[in-house]
Image: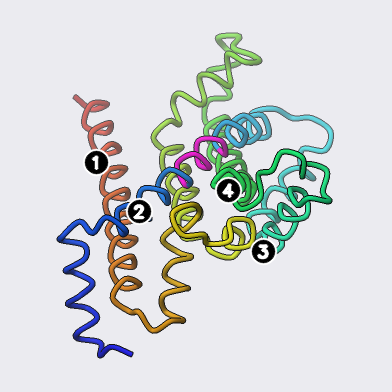
Amino acid sequence: MESLGSAVADAFGLVLSGDPALMEIIGLSLRVTLSAVVLACLFGLPIGAAAGAFRFPGRTALAVVLNALMGLPPVVVGLGVYLTLSASGPLGVLGLLYTPTAMVIAQTILVTPIVAALTRQVIEDLNSEYAEQFASLGVRGTDRVGALLWDARYSLLTVALAGFGRAIAEVGAVIIVGGNINHVTRVMTTTIALETSKGNLSLALALGVVLLAIAFIVNALVMAVRASAARSAYA
């Protein structure tokens, strides 16, 4: 096993040199994660907006379910997707197991409840604040949901960021359905787990540094967008 100092030096060397293997793993990680977050937003935003803006039978039960699903165990999700996509499963004929698509499916299942639950809370708070204005203007139905989503767009960016953070750090589900196959399904988190077990700390540390850098960059971008929006609102 390498010494810590040597491993750190080698890790920064890999990052700064743009090592092709490292870039391939980072690229696949970002493609899988961004695809899952986009799909989770497509499913989760309408569900959360409807639950936050309208009153209907089962609304409270839906909120409880969404909140509970935010803590879905990744290995359980991975097992469920594995059984569904395996050769004997209902979708086995599609041949998606051990592909990036299977990893996107698993991450989407994990992130969608987070997006939906946080969106419900944001929209519910905003709907209460705007209730009198909507009533006086006669704004109802999809127009009201559209107005709420637009006014909450910067808060919803933070919701999407929470989903991104959950997805890109995921390892349990993606390693079950993806298999960590070199040049096919190897992403940052599964590579860190594999290389650490092999004692190759340089690559594991390099990917850890990149993961932290991505988290800082995404957070900084969202804060910059929100600050810019706040300045525009008061200009």
**Between tags 4 and 3, which lies in front?**
4
Is 127 in the magenta? no
Distance from Cα at disc 1 to Cα at disc 3: 33 Å
Say if 185 sits above or below 32 in the image. Answer: below
Rendered location of residue 172, percent (x, y): 59, 65
For residue 67, the mark is none
At 27% from the left edge and 58% from the top edge, which residue is drawn?
Answer: 213
Label 3 SS: loop
Q: Earlier in the sequence, mark 3 or mark 2?
A: 2
Distance from Cα at disc 3 to Cα at disc 2: 24 Å
What is the three-letter code of the residue carrying label 1?
Answer: Ala
In the picture of the structure, the residue carrying the numbered disc 1 is 224
What is the three-letter code of the residue carrying label 3?
Answer: Pro
What is the three-letter code of the residue carrying label 2?
Answer: Ile
Q: Earlier in the sequence, mark 1 or mark 2?
A: 2
* Quarter placement of the N terminus: bottom left
Contact check, label 4 and label 2, Cβ < 8 Å = no
Label 4 SS: loop
Badge 3, how many Cα within 10 Å: few under 14, some, many 20+?
few
Distance from Cα at disc 1 to Cα at disc 2: 24 Å
In the picture of the structure, the residue carrying the numbered disc 4 is 99
In magenta, the rendered stretch is 33-40
Q: Earlier in the sequence, mark 4 or mark 1?
A: 4
Distance from Cα at disc 4 to Cα at disc 2: 16 Å
Q: Is residue 195 left or right of residue 65?
A: left
In the picture of the structure, the residue carrying the numbered disc 3 is 73
Contact check, label 1 and label 2, Cβ < 8 Å = no
